[in-house]
Image (cartoon, rainbow, N blue to C red):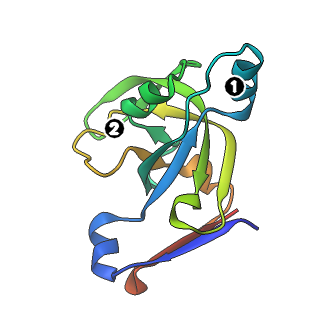
Amino acid sequence: MPSFFTNSEPRALAANGPVIPVHIWLPAFERQRLQEAHVPVHGMVQVGALIDSGASFTSIAPRVARELGLVPQGATQMFTAGHPTWISLYDVALDIGQAIGVQSVVIDPIRVGEAPLTGQTQIECLVGRDVLAMGLFTYVGFAGSFGFSV
C-alpha cells in the first residue's frame, strides 16, 4: 500500500497546515501521444501542495498549467469564500511523496482545476477530497505529523 508519513513541529503544522512537495507532469496517455507524434514532452514540475479536506477537488496554480503546456479539458464552477468563478480543468499525473523521499502515491491520470490560489507564496497545489477519497489521511496535530495511504 503506497503511503507516506511526515513529522514536524506541532506549531509549524498548525500554522502552515499539511504541506508537502509534489511532482506534477503530463498523464501517461498524453506523454505517449506526444512521443508518437515526435513532439517534445514537457518535464515534471515540483510544487508545494496543501492537503485540503475543504477542497472538493485537486487544484493547481496557473503557472503549473502554463509550464507544462496543459490543454484545457473542460471547465467547472469553483466556489470560494469570495464568490463563484469558472476555472479550466486539466488532466495531469500527480506524485505525492517522491519529493520527500518516501514511497510515492501516484495518481495518473487525475483531472484538476486551475485555481488562482491568490495570496499563497509556497503553495501551488491543493490536494482535495477527490484524492483523499482514495485512501486514509491521518492528521495528528499534537504530534506535528500527518500521513496518507492509498
| Nearest to N terminus: mark 2 or mark 1 | 1
The answer, for residue 139, to whether it is visible in the render is no
Relative to 95, does residue 40 appear above or below in the rendering?
above
Q: Label 1 neighbourhood size at 10 Å, few (<14), some (14-19), many (20+)? A: some
Residue 141: name its quadrant.
Answer: bottom left
Q: What amino acid type is highlighted by mark number 2?
A: Thr
Question: How far across and down, in percent of the image, does residue 53 sit?
Answer: 48, 56
Of all residues, the one furthest to the top in this rendering is: 37
Mark 2 vs mark 1, foreground winner is 1
Q: Front-most of 132 and 10?
A: 10
Element on which disc 2 rests: loop
Question: How far across and down, in percent of the image, does residue 76 sit?
Answer: 50, 24
Q: Label 2 neighbourhood size at 10 Å, few (<14), some (14-19), many (20+)? A: few
Task: Say which residue appears at 60% left-offset and 70% top-offset.
Answer: 4
Q: What amino acid type is highlighted by mark number 1?
A: Glu
Q: Which mark is residue 30?
A: 1
Relative to 129, does residue 112 appear above or below in the rendering?
above
- Residue at image mark 2: 80
Question: How far across and down, in percent of the image, does residue 47 sit?
Answer: 42, 48
Q: Is residue 10 left or right of residue 125?
A: left
